[in-house]
Amino acid sequence: MAISMTKQQIMEINHKCSNNWKFNIVFWVYHSQKTLFKKLKIDDTGFFEFSLSYNSENQIILHIDKFNYIKDVETAICEEKGKNIILDKTPNKRRNIKKLIDITEQLTDEQLLKLNAETK
């Protein structure tokens, strides 16, 4: 069974997201799961990448990776495992992209940095 999304559907999801969150097309292509992501530049040394998705218990999670730029090369690497934060512990009956979109309204740059700092 082929599952596909049109460019229009992706644009509609991106338009509904708040605070510069976007649909993760690459994750959709490789895993057939609808997730959202956001990159937040730290400084010239690297950036954070935040992902909103569901875990195996259908709870909404925020995954945080920190990427550092390699000196003299135009690429970045993630040297750590990353952090997972359960944002909504209530198990959902199904994985609904609308719930992820709704949460983006609360996840401002300041809130994301605060969650990162508070999480080990």
Image (cartoon, helix red, strand yellow):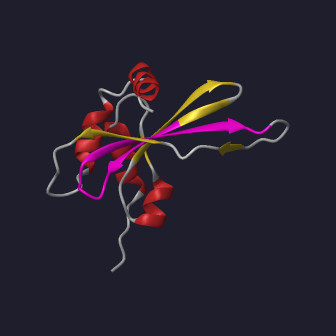
Quadrant housing the C terminus: top left
* Predominant SS of the magenta segment: strand
Residue 67 in which image quadrant: top right
Q: Residue 59 or 37: which is nearer the viewer?
A: 59
Position in image of residue 54 (x %, y %): 30, 51
Position in image of residue 78 (x %, y %): 63, 44
What residue do we see at 39% from left, 60% from top? 6
56, above or below 81, in the image: below
Q: Is residue 21 left or right of residue 72?
A: left
Query: Residue most toward the front?
Result: 120
Let me know if residue 75 is in the magenta part: no
Residue 1 in which image quadrant: bottom left
Q: How many marks?
A: 0
What residue do we see at 42% from left, 36% from top? 21
Q: Is residue 93 left or right of residue 86?
A: left
Position in image of residue 108 (x %, y %): 39, 24
What residue do we see at 25% from left, 36% from top? 102
For the magenta stretch, what is the residue range?
Answer: 49-70
Q: Residue 84 or 71: which is nearer the viewer?
A: 84
Q: Is residue 74 left or right of residue 98?
A: right
What residue do we see at 51% from left, 57% from top? 26
Position in image of residue 77 (x %, y %): 68, 45
Q: Residue 63 or 25: which is nearer the viewer?
A: 63
Query: Residue most toward the bottom?
Result: 1
Q: Residue 119 or 38: which is nearer the viewer?
A: 119
Query: Residue most toward the right?
Result: 72
Let me know if residue 60 is in the magenta part: yes
